Image (cartoon, rainbow, N blue to C red):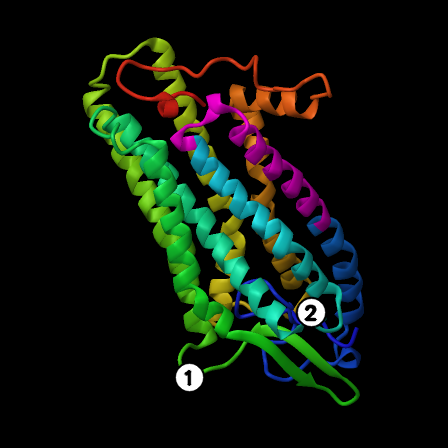
Amino acid sequence: MADIYFENTTLFYHPTISTSTELVQPDDNDIYPEISRLVRIIVPLCFGLIALTGFFGNTLVILVVLLNQQMHSTTNLLIVNLAIADLLFVVFCIPFTATDYVADTWPFGDLWCRIVQYLIVVTAFASIYTLVLMSIDRFLAVVHPIRSRMLRTEKITKICICAIWGVILTILLPVALSHGIVQIHGATYTQELCRFMENSFLSPSVYQIIFFATSYLLPLMVISGLYVRMITSLWRHGTSVRMSVESQRGRKRVTRLVVVVVIAFASLWLPIQIILLLKALDIYQATTKFTVILQIIAQTLAYTSSCINPVLYAFLSDNFRKAFYKAINCTNRCQDYTSDLPPARKTSYARTSTTGF
């Protein structure tokens, strides 16, 4: 392994221990052998576990919702969309990022380099803006349950999901165009690295600041504002709609789950977002064993967000937990594993999308 590249101005590829344009040669870097061994062991283990857990967990989420008519609701459709984004990330991003960590050079060619970096950013945006939609859905369900019932339908939710994907896939096309194979020439070797390419239109630091603001800071500000407004409204006016105690409890359970999913996403992505932002501002440099390990941990936490949601659903949702159990333990005699799930709860003024979780 000629060099380990832990300096990365864009999202997650070949890390570098050098912040200058010159590569740090192994003979001149005392921490090189130890870091090399550490990366080769930790990264495949951590990323492999995340990939397997995320693949099976998110696939299970998608199946139990799509195959169970009783679980079709606005919130669950958004959960499926979140699972799809996580599944795309697990399949198309994690394996290639892990390979990039341990390989001497990027082995997949220029086209796949652009596709992988594009999908990393696309899935990150799809996840966070799905959480924004989920928060809007909860806000309308709690604060404006009657007035919003015509908006909170499966049809409109599907339109919103398609619109989000269409906008994200379109506006992020420059990400693919601004990445590619960069050749690094050493005294006795040449490396091909998949990374952000210098251009006159967008600098690496500006790119990372824009990514931080649009994929993390602004969406979380919107989500926080919605929940502050929701809490304020409930504190001042309470509930203005008469509903059964069971319906109120169902509404609270759904809202609690959405809040936990948002907090988990924000917490797991926070370390790597801060590191990448500090790198863009030339404040953080991965030049020591501690900073390199810190960056690996931060990236692993961010990747964990792609597999944590099914676990949260299993712990916080009775319907998901029972559906998971039925799906996992289904045999040939079990033709419809959702047949004995508890029926979706309804209210007199809204569909099951408010409580049928």
Q: Which residue is mark 2?
A: 108
Main SS category, magenta section: helix
Q: Within 10 angstroms of label 1, few (less than 14), some, or many (20 or more) residues?
A: few
Measured from the top left, where is residue 187 in percent x and y? 76, 90
Say which of 332 and 93 sits in front. Answer: 332
**Which three-letter amino acid code belongs to the residue tagged 2?**
Phe
Left or right of 78 on screen, residue 327: right
Q: Which mark is residue 109?
A: none
Location of residue 210 (image quadrant): bottom left
In magenta segment, residue 167: no
- Give the residue pinned by disc 1: 200
| Residue 11 image-quadrant placement | bottom right
Q: Are marks 2 and 1 in contact (CB under 8 Å)?
A: no
The relative height of residue 26 versus residue 212 in the rendered view (above or below) is: below
> Residue 259, image x and y in percent?
42, 34
Q: Residue at x 67, y 61 (%)?
A: 96
Q: CA distance from mark 2 to mark 1?
A: 27 Å
Q: Nearer the viewer, mark 2 or mark 1?
A: 2
Near mark 2 (Cα within 10 A), the count class, few <14, some 14-19 or many ≥20, is some
Q: Amino acid at mark 1?
A: Ser
> Which corner quadrant holds the N terminus?
bottom right
Q: Percent x, y for residue 321?
A: 58, 22
Residue for point 19% across, 24% down: 236
Residue 283 in sight from this viewpoint: no
Please report the bounds of the magenta region as a residue range. 48-75
Observer able to see residue 80: yes
- Image quarter hosting the C terminus: top left
2 or 1: tag closer to the N-terminus: 2
